Image: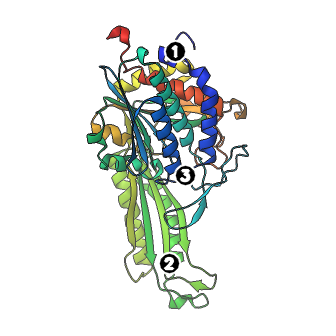
Amino acid sequence: MTSTDHPLLAGLPALLPGLRDLYEDLHAHPELSFQEKRTAQVVADRLRGQGWEVTAGVGGTGVVGVLRNGEGPTVLLRADMDALPVKEETGLAYASTATAVNETGETVPVMHACGHDMHVTCLLGATQLLAANPDTWRGTVLAVFQPAEEVGGAPVMIEDGFLERFPRADVCLAQHVAPLPVGYAGTRHGTVMAASDNLHVRLFGKGGHGSAPETTVDPVVMAAAVIMRLQTVVAREIGATQMAVVTVGAVQAGTKENIIPDTAELKINIRSAGPAVREQVVSAVKRIIRSEAMASAAPREPEITELHTFPVTVNDPAATDQVLTAMARVVGSERAFTMPQPVTGSEDFGTFGAALQVPSVFWFYGALDPEIFDGFQLADLVTEGRLPDVPSSHSPRFAPLAGPAIETGVRLMLSAASEWLTHPAAS
């Protein structure tokens, strides 16, 4: 423990081997969104063993721990638990070989390709130290282990009575591993992550024999036209100083090369950094889908179904200053940085702060082995927003450097929380 550590970090070195074992276990046993039963059981058992009040089954598989320690602020600390339908290619000794049945009934490989296993491990390390060092802090802590971040589990927890069932937080804090070397951490004031809108589109044609396309209305050609035209939304309708992304992530049509099918389906992801741009992009995407169907003489209007939606993640400016101060204590002022622009990825963590109407802060910290980085310069990231060319979140090769990343994550979480939790000497 360095001289700048908060006293509640005392004992962390002794916990690290066990936390490493926990991380490897969670990594080897990933679970899809809303299927995190094993993970939730592990979390609940550990929290109970540490002395926390535990409520399981919040929002399906969510777990909430409450630790009351006298008068003082209430701090919400959140970790997400779900994994992704990705086949792991890291080559780690504890790599996942798990499969699961997804929401459509398909058996898919499963991997913690977004670092949620690291988030769970770090928060459980933080909860253990909070419980073990009650003489170093005052207040109440909510440890929220959230299901299904990838598909919007936070709103489901809110809908399950979260606001009424648990103490009202004064601030909400969360972190995410990033494709940066261990030892760096960053966040920004205001918008930190983009909004996300997700659409399922069904295009209708008229099927027939592949040798006689003139007797059909080909939904495959229709889908191709939609996909190509969608690429013009950001390029030709959104200003160069505004941020938006449109991605067609899935296309499904037909069963055989000589049969023109009746339908084609698309799954579309839209990212935006503000409400005006969000409305403009979503409207343009829907307009193009309908217009291309009309131009193709589709026999009926496309079906456009809105799937899960994440709002913009916004950091409270004053609270962000406090977290940046905490970051500097952990990684040093030269490695604690302010991000130049919002991340185009999305998060549902902001749902907690918005529902509670309290400040929230979300930050990122490096979790990868410094040896895989070639010529990394923080200045490139801070001035140009340019990430290194290494495996990142959602990659089958994303592999945090477990030991150092766990230690850094626990220190960051507790150092940030200590900005609000009252020290006994000051109470």
Q: Say which mark, if any, is on residue 31.
A: 3
Alpha carbons under labels 2 and 3: distance apart: 35 Å
**Between tags 3 and 1, which lies in front?**
3
Quarter of the image with the N terminus in it: top right
Earlier in the chain: of badge 3 and badge 1, it is: 1
Instruction: Say few, some or many: other residues with alpha carbon within 10 Å of mark 1 (under 14 / 14 to 19 / 20 or more).
Output: some
Q: Which residue is mark 1?
A: 5
User: Is the Cβ of the residue at disc 1 closer than 8 Å to that at disc 2?
Assistant: no
The residue that appears at 28% across and 37% down in the rendered structure is: 356
The residue that appears at 51% across and 86% down in the rendered structure is: 207
Instruction: Say few, some or many: other residues with alpha carbon within 10 Å of mark 2 (under 14 / 14 to 19 / 20 or more).
Output: many
Instruction: Say few, some or many: other residues with alpha carbon within 10 Å of mark 3 (under 14 / 14 to 19 / 20 or more).
Output: many
In this orientation, which residue lies closer to the viewer: 212 or 154?
Answer: 154
Q: Which residue is mark 2?
A: 219
**Compared with residue 44, is residue 261 higher up or lower down, i.e. above or below?**
below
Q: Amino acid at mark 3?
A: Glu
Earlier in the chain: of badge 2 and badge 3, it is: 3
Q: Amino acid at mark 1?
A: Asp
Counting from the top left corner in percent of width and height, residue 101 is at: 55, 63
Quarter of the image with the C terminus in it: top left
